[in-house]
Amino acid sequence: MRCFLYIALFFVGVQSVFCQSDVLAQKYLDQGEYAKALSIYQDLVKESPGNSNYFMGLVTAHQELEDFVMAESLLLERLKNTNNNPSTLIDLGHNYELQNNPELAKKQYVDALSALNEKANYAYSIARNFEKYSLLDYAEQAYVLGMKLNPEMNFDLPLARIYGEQGKLDEMFAAYLELIVKQPEVGSNLMREFDRYILEDPTNPANISLRKQLLQNLQKTQDVLYSELLAWLFIQQKDFQKAFLQEKAIYRRNNKDLQRIIQLTVLAKSEGDIRSAKEIVSFIIAETTSPIILIQANQLLLDMKLSTAKESDFKELEKDFQQVLSEFGTGLETMAIQIDYANFLAFKMNKIEEAKQLLNTLSKSQLNNFQQAAIKMVLADILVLDQKFNQALIYYSQIQTLVKNDEIAQNARFKVAKTSYFKGDFTWALSQLNVLKASSTQLIANDAMELSLLIKENSLEDSTQTALKLYARADLLAFQNKIDEAVGVLNEILLNHKGEKLEDEALLKQAELFKLSENWKKAEENYLKILEFYGKDILADNATFLLAELYNDKFGNPERAKQYYEQIIFSFPDSIYFVDARKKFRSLRGDVLE
């Protein structure tokens, strides 16, 4: 027994040595140390002549050392010993290609394909070997011939991938669509292949090809699959109106299941296409009889109306809220709508007491901890709006007790810090922010870091913190939607604290407030001042990117926008805006994005 154990351990040891040698030889090949690789592969082939990986490593090492005669000799010997394996003919042909002998190479490739007439089962290995050398046309022929000779073989998937690499988009999508029809269960995996070619741009050749084929297939058969794929394509193109048309057709043929249309509403809203999202959610409200869906849809519609409402729309929006609550009641089912309504009353209509009363009434219901926390959060925010900071701090602290370790608790802690900052209690604010900088929620951690830096950097030079207190005051006024007053306080900083660290922060904050009142020209002036006087400071990339966005979205000046996007790419490679700037720059330049 012990003897057998020693033998087994010996073979394991030998195998381990071979594996290590193989890895080392490949490493030498990768590093261009071909003579060292050759020496190891010679030993490996001597010990294990049947191992095809070792053999091809040896051939490759000879080829890299330009010893094509020896490589040819090895391949011919291999061909003889493997009963003319057609895959070896391809390796031999490649060796002739390396010697600039295309005619002789072509003969080997043709011979390899011809061998399929007798050895159809070699089709896959032959095609894969052609692919290894990027001989895609030959690989295509091998797959097609193999399926013709043996109909039981199915190479539709690798063939579709080859069509894609060849740029034969029509053939590629036709093959993929046929596969999806035959095997719907693999559809989601195949859609990942579509992602490699489909872009947001509807004029992209791949988008045009897929759309054309789907429409043609829909004309031949009303298979719902093609409508689903068309809807997917339109969503990739951010064309939610056309996606909605397809989804309505699917809905009518799919037992009137609204789930897909609900998902489309959320997508359209998240992409900023509020007009389409409103139309889609209105359709949901008209179609459904489910009270739960009706409540959720109405909440979404109210939220979207609010996101685009001007002050002149507020009275009508207030009536909309009241109508929905009148229809569905003020129980826990409509809690989310009631919370939104309270926020609207306080922050938009300045009806603070009415908002508090609504929330206090709601808080008397049978609530779980998370529901209590949600109501207390809004109440606390309204108390900050009303400048009742100490009461607000109590509520924020209670939330942290109610939902310990939850993201809501971390958000409440951040609001404790922000409220303390509004009050001018910068020391307590910093103590809270120091804890939050390690938050598991990236957004909260980033916000905490940003506010912490603002306080620290503007407390060092000015022990009285005069400018920082003014800035916090402006921040509070902005929170209270008192935009003109906030702009005025920031002007005071810019006039009386010139050259201080806070000046660029004040310019940036003021620019954002100008944008809220659609004063695009003033916002532009502020961004340009930051670049003129603080072009090498921490906010320079913010100003550069936001200026580009202003020119692109509001001034209709893509050439100027392109200049500033380009500055982000070349001057601020570490900026958080880098990826977006590069994408938008390339789009404005007319590049085909991949």
Image: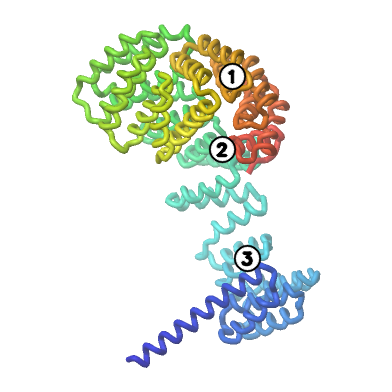
As measured in the structure, the alpha-carbon distance from the residue carrying label 1 to the one carrying label 2 is: 48 Å
**Residue 576 occupies which quadrant of the picture?**
top right
Q: Nearer the viewer, mark 1 or mark 3?
A: 1
* Label 3 secondary element: helix
- Mark in the foreground, 3 or 2: 3
For marks 3 and 2 on the same chain, the one whose residue lies earlier in the sequence: 3
Can residue 379 be seen? Answer: no
Q: CA distance from mark 1 to mark 3?
A: 63 Å
- Mark 3 Cα-neighbour bin, 10 Å: few <14, some 14–19, many ≥20: many
Residue nearest the viewer, comparing 422 with 322: 422
Please tell me the numbered disc located at residue 511: 1
- Give x and y (percent) for residue 549: 62, 26
> Which disc, if any, is residue 346?
none
User: Could you say whether the residue bearing mark 1 is in a helix, strand or loop?
Assistant: helix
Residue designated by label 2: 215
Q: Is residue 197 above or below residue 475?
A: below
Residue drawn where x is 44% and y is 36% of the image: 445
Q: Quadrant of residue 572?
A: top right
Q: Residue at x 65, y 15 (%)?
A: 521
